[in-house]
Image (spheres, helix red, strand yellow):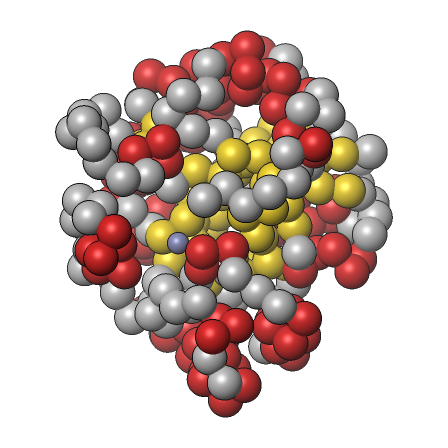
Amino acid sequence: MKIPILMYHQICEQVSPGTPFRGLLVRPAAFRRQMALMHLLGYQGLSMSGLLPYLQGKAVGKVFGITFDDGYLNNLELALPVLQRYGFSATCYAVSRMLGQTNAWDIAQGVPQVPLMTAKELSEWIDQGQEVGSHTCDHLKLPQLDEVSQRYQLMQSRMDLERDLPSQEAVRHFCYPYGAFDRDTVQLVQQAGYQSATTTRRGRADVGSANDLLLLPRVLVSRRTSLPLFALKCFSAYEDRRGTSAY
Ligand SMILES: [Zn+2]
């Protein structure tokens, strides 16, 4: 049994030609069509908290996960209304020390800077039935850090977000920046008390495999993903065979 966990970054209309990683900027109309299709087929879109019992094999149903990396303001402005329309919930992974700033970690690659949600905007996201997970404090490649720094990024980001977002009970879900991890990192994620962690490894998640909850693969939805391809990614082995990093 496989469950697709969709990976989105930004939802936005305009992209200037030549923008690096512009494939990660999904058009609002495409996002709407994707969610409408899942709804039409009777599937319920869930945040990682909502999805967890299904991943553990404790619940069974037509469900899929929805995740947004980095915490862009356009998630609140353009994705939230669509999620609400269908009664879906999603997890947005925020970078705890960069709330209200921009995706500064992308500057060196020439990626245009766009606003990230402030604590107030993330609280609004939560108040509208959505979830916030951690994407570290500073969007760093964890395996490049020593153990103390990795622990800090994992623990402190949780504490930052739990302090800044009191309307969410706890931060229990994690996403590896750049999809970067090694064996030590995964162990540290577990020790930091996270219940799940998503990667950029492509594929659908296996049900009932407890070890894999900290190494969850996702289904990459890009600007070029047509609706038929989206369906293929969610309902066939297409994405499971990709296996490589999304970047
Ligand atoms: Zn990221």
Q: Position of residue 116 (x, y in %)?
A: 24, 52
Q: Of all residues shown, which one is farthest toward the bottom?
A: 148
* Residue drawn at (78%, 60%) of the image: 211
Name the image quarter holding the C terminus. Answer: top left
152 lies above or below 101: below
Ligand 1 shows up in the quarter that is bottom left
Q: Is residue 53 positioned above or below 18 on the image? A: below
Residue 239, percent across and down? Answer: 64, 30
In the picture, the quarter occupied by the N terminus is top right
Q: Please identify the quarter of the rendering in which residue 197 is found.
A: bottom right
Name the one closer to the observer, 88 or 71. 71
User: Is 79 displayed left or right of 50 in the figure?
Assistant: left
Question: Residue sitting at 46 percent across and 14 percent down?
Answer: 226
Residue 82 at least partly seen: no
- The residue lying toward the viewer, choosing from 191 and 215, is 215
* Residue at horizontal 27 percent and vertical 39 percent from the top: 20
x, y (%) of residue 6? Answer: 54, 35
Residue placed most toward the observer, 10 or 21: 21
Asked if one can make out residue 68 in the rendered structure from this viewpoint, the answer is: yes
Question: Looking at the image, which residue is at 76% across and 34% down?
Answer: 2
Q: Is residue 141 above or below residue 88?
A: below
207 sits left or right of 6 in the view: right
